[in-house]
Amino acid sequence: MRIVIIGAVAGGASAAARARRLSEEAEIILVERGEAPSFANCGLPYYIGGVIEQRDKLLVAPAQRLIERYRLDVRTRTEALAIDRANHTVRLRYLENCDEYDQPYDKLILSPGAAPIRPPVPGVDLPQVYTLRELRDADRLHAAAKHAQRAVVIGGGFIGLEMAENLVHRGIATTVVELANQILPPWDAEMVSPVADHLRERGVTLKLSNAAAAIEPAGDGVIVRLRSGESLDADMVVLSVGVRPDNKLAVEAGLAVGPRGGIRVNDQMQTADPDIYAVGDAIETHSSLDGSPTQIPLAGPANRQGRIAADNIFGRPTHYAGTQGTAIVGVFEMAAALTGFSEKALKAAGTPYEKVYVHPANHAGYYPGAKQMSMKLLFAPDGGRLLGAQAVGRSGVDKRIDVLAVAIKAGMSVFDLEELELAYAPQFGSAKDPVNMAGFVAAGVVRGDQPVAHWDDLPQLAAEDGQSEGLGRPEGLGPPELVLDVRMASEFAAGSIPGAVNIPVDELRSRLGELDPARPIIAYCQVGMRGYLATRILLQYGFNVRNLSGGYTTYKQTMAAKGA
Amino acid sequence: MRIVIIGAVAGGASAAARARRLSEEAEIILVERGEAPSFANCGLPYYIGGVIEQRDKLLVAPAQRLIERYRLDVRTRTEALAIDRANHTVRLRYLENCDEYDQPYDKLILSPGAAPIRPPVPGVDLPQVYTLRELRDADRLHAAAKHAQRAVVIGGGFIGLEMAENLVHRGIATTVVELANQILPPWDAEMVSPVADHLRERGVTLKLSNAAAAIEPAGDGVIVRLRSGESLDADMVVLSVGVRPDNKLAVEAGLAVGPRGGIRVNDQMQTADPDIYAVGDAIETHSSLDGSPTQIPLAGPANRQGRIAADNIFGRPTHYAGTQGTAIVGVFEMAAALTGFSEKALKAAGTPYEKVYVHPANHAGYYPGAKQMSMKLLFAPDGGRLLGAQAVGRSGVDKRIDVLAVAIKAGMSVFDLEELELAYAPQFGSAKDPVNMAGFVAAGVVRGDQPVAHWDDLPQLAAEDGQSEGLGRPEGLGPPELVLDVRMASEFAAGSIPGAVNIPVDELRSRLGELDPARPIIAYCQVGMRGYLATRILLQYGFNVRNLSGGYTTYKQTMAAKGA
């Protein structure tokens, strides 16, 4: 059995190692265009920023080890040019001397990755404009960052923000330009507005709903002209507007690709040609939640896919269960994580959903160092099955999203979250963990104990949008809701929802007479806890009341996102 | 509806708050023997140690707030003396003036907690001997710790180690005396030997397999005489040998208790008397894994049980699903966590199981600050269903046990762990997370790809135990196994299993001729990864070979535990 693997990073390297563990007999040829196999591509921004000081730390599995330990035929600086499916050969070129030859294979695994998109902007090919994909890109950026004073990062996704953080670590004044009206487009906008604030606190300038119109040389540097008309001086520009599957080999060999360019495979990672497999960032996969096609350029899925391709080549019928889109990004002291569907994805798909927000501390509030996080849970309104979760904060965000990722994988509902028995000591969590809290709140909504409202139900905002009633309110519902702030007077005075009336929850029972029983109420507090109690009290006294989910905190994050 | 709740900490306070949210009409009387309801009992050791500086941080829900916000009738410094089931009254005594009265109830919720066990040792009632249960205990310890120079902690469980850490924070020379031959008895011994080492590094003296025989006054302090014959001078002694359900009220009222004293309840938290519920540390509950009875004095389950009792009083048929024993303890810079069954519990129950050990880093090794942890996974040998997990390390232990707690709750197998899609960026994890890694290894064992051996399979250790062959080896198996160290020669030279032969994995294929094909092999490396590859190579060349799970690291931890 001769296996040729094109691309030696996450998916390809995993396939090669797995193949060797399954067969001492196989000839395994690992072809890599770059200088090194299996390098830490997720670490590149941190090398550029000096967080990772030694370049050789990036060489996770050096070629020599793969050769000695896994007996791989490692061919670096070698490009695959074309597949001859009929003859079972792939045309390879050694880039050092441009020698070309046809390499026979019995099974071919394509793991070419995805390439940074270069937007069709004049000046995008200037030498001061960089992308980040390979080690040598990181070397170039590492060198450029040593001397640069001003940088522009185009694209505010994962790589864009990681680059921005690391350029700031180098003392470079950095501006991020993002086409969307939010950073981190996979998340919902209101969840990441605290991350945007944090970037600004750390000196990063954000230009949202904007884009580069042209990049022009200016002395040693460039001028980036934005669509908004502004101009930014920069010594270096980093393009990070997304990636596109590197599907050229596959397409030219007549293999099918999806609408966004991902190579089509079955759940055994096999293309339409049974002797050609494809894995990693180059493929189209499917959602493990609803089976819909998706592309997820992340290392975890790539590793698993590589393993599965090797399994199937050696007759082990393992299957890829799809991806649920779990991801995390660190941005200075903050992190944003998500799993499953976002609200915008559910909306786009027309899937019915409900949502709640909570803002718990990462561990017991009485133990020093507790930090507030924000969590959003998306679930089926009927039955409460979990559909997605997002969390943003300073600490403990990764843990909660991992817990929720497993819960989603297991098909759990919000009721199951109430019962999860998680590890508690005051340094690590709370007796009612943030995940339990989110479950309590969401279960209360599904059970009908706690009707919820959201920002677009607020009559004030509906009016702003030029409507006389809440967005979600049918005609003829009577007077618009009273917005009732149940926080202490001092909190109310420090900032509140315009038009709200203040009755602190502790005084509510004795001041019920101030409320019109015929007028529906939206109650809110700082994070939703006192609003919940107020809702329970008012419901029992016969009022039509809803609790504003996430309280004033979510309201402010939402307004910040809208105002950006 | 008049509800009387005896005990106002986790379970009782949760029941009271839930009851109020469900009913504005109910009269809710919260009876607490101590001075404050709903204090942070898990925070008491950290207050004593000065980690939590302000005492009022411990008052999580002050009485005034419970009165104003939840309209509770809070009666602190009040003890419940007896229940008159026939007349539906409970006899209460106000401790400030010893007034007694009969308080009628419609429903009674017992949440009296558990009391520290005072072992029958002469001198246990000396004023220098402390236990920790209530705020005033913490006050006394806080005062004593200010002047003490030497302390003895009797009992090396959760509270004992938290107290030891905090006494060290106060600059007190501290000795922990533990009856078992390990600290933290709920864990398996080899998993917590690194925690014992860490305690010693931080200056704590451990006396394992030992106990106090007598405590004698000596000047202002005491002398603790141990069973071993040693004597320890101390200014203060802390008793933390465990807790016993505070079941006096229940027993005297004729309510059933289990063999270890826990009040018997059904899964709606109801005792045999339908108008009396019981929750928290005082009850016997059941394992969510196999239904066996258990007592778990932890805050998380107590909170959930309190909620469920209130639900059922108001006609909501919610059920307690049992406990899986998830727990964590921080010890200086380390943490130990577990969920599900330990190996010793599985052995005691006669449940078939297999186990694997892994020693991954908490996040990508190339990102600064990566710390190695140790994980143990217990699973059904047939089918791989998860039975339990333990993790010990400096960082990220809580996250992995929480993930595994959800996996166990969901009934997942080791194969599911392979596929979990967890949040990865280099600061937070690895593309193959430690949980995935544990799943890969365990799944390899269940599939038969990777036969495993454990320390008690090593012929060297069998010989030490006075046997000529491995403990688990039937007679007539032929020669004892060759123990093959596949690490580099330098690692082998720095320490190895006695009698092992060294062939580095990278040389293994070319040195197969040195191995006797008729002799079974146990291969090992540092953590099990290279041993796995060596096992795969040797299996394919026809050898009878097993991989020593967890490698030399688990071996050393096991030997440390045996030698302790």
Image (cartoon, coloured by chain):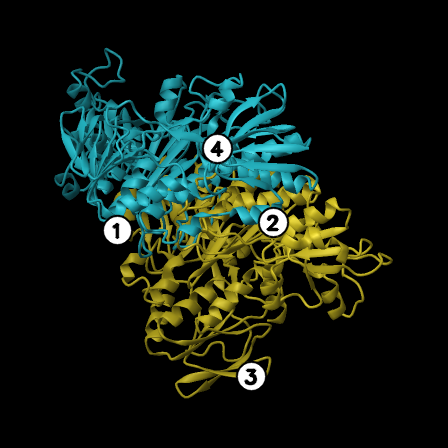
Chain colours: A cyan, B yellow
Label 4 or label 3, whichever lies nearer to me, is 4
The front one of B412 and A441 is: B412
Of callouts 3 and 1, the N-terminal one? 1
Subunit under mark 3: B
Q: Are marks 1 and 4 on the same chain?
A: no
Type of amino acid under label 3: Glu
Which residue, given by chain and number where applicable, does mark 3 sit on? B230
Type of amino acid under label 1: Gln
Of callouts 4 and 2, the N-terminal one? 2
Which residue, given by chain and number where applicable, does mark 1 sit on? B64
The front one of A502 and B24 is: A502
Q: Where, by quadrant of the figure, is residue A474 drawn?
A: top left
User: What is the CA distance from the residue labelled 1 to the residue labelled 4?
Assistant: 81 Å
- The local secondary structure at tag 4 comes to loop
Type of amino acid under label 4: Cys
Q: Residue A98 shows which numbered tag?
A: 4
